[in-house]
Image (cartoon, grey):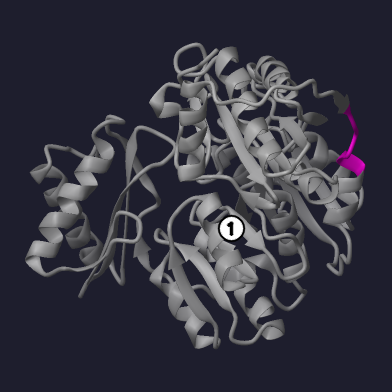
């Protein structure tokens, strides 16, 4: 028996597709056979599996487990919960790998898989190799068993281990995503006053889409914070590995700003340490790390890329513009939105509230992450064309992940999304006039490649 995955399912740092179009139960089963074989041939025998609250996740879990067991792998089922709870189970559960079934922040009709082997992300060429194995039917055979455990209370215990924060009045928005039940348990363990939104897990996402990197999805949390005069609010994406924050004045604290907020405390304990951030992050972040004696390290966007880079260079802290934050100082180094929320509480003090910390950040003219549709089979080619033109013109360009161009006005970025059929743009300048000039450069490059960026 063999299986062919839709090529768009095999992404750079995870697997994602549209259910019943590019992703179905047969894909989940074949993934189980392929990944189970990889783990078995590396000497492993047990894999942890969890799933998020999407409507298709239970179906995919059943097929995935059947495939894993058919490859001779025993399965530790941790059930419904956020991706970082699965990562935690992989760290402490005496397993050789892990798979979370999740569509993360993608539309509700999509789903996918995040994979871990040996406490490290399984991504890039390794994911492509799963497709090669499936197409050849290159699978081990066996009769693995599965059993279920409940790990949520142990996970919450770990989140609050060593907690040294003080009491704050906080709003929490789980967005009907997989973090909801953990949030309910977590706030019972924390001091202060807590107001909860949308903790019921519902794959229809009836209130708003669970993507805190989009400011429109933070409207309910902002309204709660302002109406009740809370100190700040936190929101999570669909699988709980990302965080969004609203300060006491209703201002968004972007992912790169959040990372900058944690830098001083980490460098105080780890002087000279490398701090990793993705190519979409503000130049103010990289300059701030250097000013504090740290080593700023600009790296590729993607949770797997950041985690791997941190391990490679021994970094205690990393993050992305989208709200993935990675703590490896006194935590495990994976992205955990719930742990990031706890660290945020711990970072605040009476003389430096979250609102104070946000007010101290430099005011730059910048865009949010601008994402616009480009065909899957065209998006990477567009970036290659743009890079060729920029190099030919002698532009100051960093090509580590797309094209990040530095000019006298600031910098701009164009890159291909690894999770959607889209390009991503961002720009930053000291003032609005400079930002407008940067955006003109972006649009000119897109125009030369036959792309028109939607302007709202």
Q: Secondary structure at mark 1?
A: helix
Seen from the viewer's position, the closer of residues 66 and 144 is 144
For the point 48% across and 56% down, the residue is 321
Rendered view: 138 above or below 224: above
Q: What quarter of the picture does the C terminus occupy?
A: top left
Residue 238 x/y as whole percent: 62, 35
Residue 231 x/y as whole percent: 72, 59
Query: In the rendered image, which quarter is residue 144 located in?
Result: top right
Residue 38 x/y as whole percent: 62, 37
Q: Which residue is mark 1?
A: 307
Seen from the viewer's position, the closer of residues 16 and 212 is 16
Q: Which residues are magenta?
A: 148-153
Q: Is residue 33 left or right of residue 69?
A: left
Residue 357 visible from this viewpoint? no
For the point 20% across and 75% down, the residue is 408
Rendered view: 166 above or below 122: below
């Amino acid at each position: 028996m063999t299986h062919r995955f839709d090529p768009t399912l095999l992404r750079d740092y995870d697997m994602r597709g549209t259910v019943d179009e590019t992703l179905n139960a047969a894909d989940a089963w074949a993934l189980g056979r392929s990944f189970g074989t990889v783990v078995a041939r590396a000497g492993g025998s047990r894999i942890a599996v969890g799933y998020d609250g999407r409507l298709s996740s239970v179906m995919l879990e059943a097929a995935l487990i059947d495939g894993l067991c058919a490859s001779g792998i025993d399965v530790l089922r941790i059930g419904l919960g956020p991706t970082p709870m699965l990562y935690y189970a992989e760290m402490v559960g005496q397993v050789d790998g892990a798979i979370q079934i999740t569509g993360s922040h993608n539309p509700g009709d999509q789903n996918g898989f995040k994979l871990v082997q040996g406490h490290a992300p399984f991504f890039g060429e390794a994911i492509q190799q799963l497709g090669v194995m499936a197409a050849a039917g290159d699978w081990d055979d066996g009769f693995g068993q599965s059993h279920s455990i409940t790990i949520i209370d142990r996970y919450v215990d770990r989140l609050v281990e060593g907690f040294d924060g003080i009491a704050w009045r906080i709003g929490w928005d789980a967005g009907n995503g997989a973090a909801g039940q953990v949030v309910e348990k977590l706030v019972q363990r924390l001091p202060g006053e807590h107001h909860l939104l949308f903790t019921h897990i519902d794959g229809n996402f009836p209130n708003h889409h669970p993507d805190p990197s989009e400011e429109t999805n933070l409207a309910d949390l902002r309204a709660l914070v302002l109406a009740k005069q809370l100190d700040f609010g936190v929101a999570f994406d669909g699988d709980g590995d990302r965080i969004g924050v609203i300060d006491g004045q209703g201002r968004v604290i972007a992912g790169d700003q959040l990372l900058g907020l944690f830098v001083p405390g980490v460098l105080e304990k780890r002087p000279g340490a490398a701090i990793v951030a993705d190519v979409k992050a503000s130049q103010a972040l990289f300059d701030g790390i250097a000013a504090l004696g740290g080593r700023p390290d600009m790296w590729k966007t993607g949770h797997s890329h950041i985690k791997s880079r941190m391990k490679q260079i021994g970094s205690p802290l990393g993050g992305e513009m989208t709200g993935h934050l990675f703590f490896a100082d006194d935590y495990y180094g994976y992205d955990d939105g719930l742990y990031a929320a706890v660290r945020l509480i711990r970072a605040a003090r009476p003389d430096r509230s979250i609102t104070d910390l946000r007010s101290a950040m430099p005011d730059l003219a910048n865009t949010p992450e601008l994402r616009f549709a480009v065909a899957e089979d065209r998006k990477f080619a567009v970036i290659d064309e743009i890079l060729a033109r920029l190099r030919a013109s002698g532009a100051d360009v960093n090509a580590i992940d797309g094209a990040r161009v530095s000019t006298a006005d600031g910098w701009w970025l164009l890159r291909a999304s690894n999770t959607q059929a889209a390009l991503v743009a961002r720009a930053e300048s000291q003032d609005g006039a400079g930002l407008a000039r940067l955006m003109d450069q972006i649009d000119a490059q897109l125009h030369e490649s036959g792309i028109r960026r939607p302007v709202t």
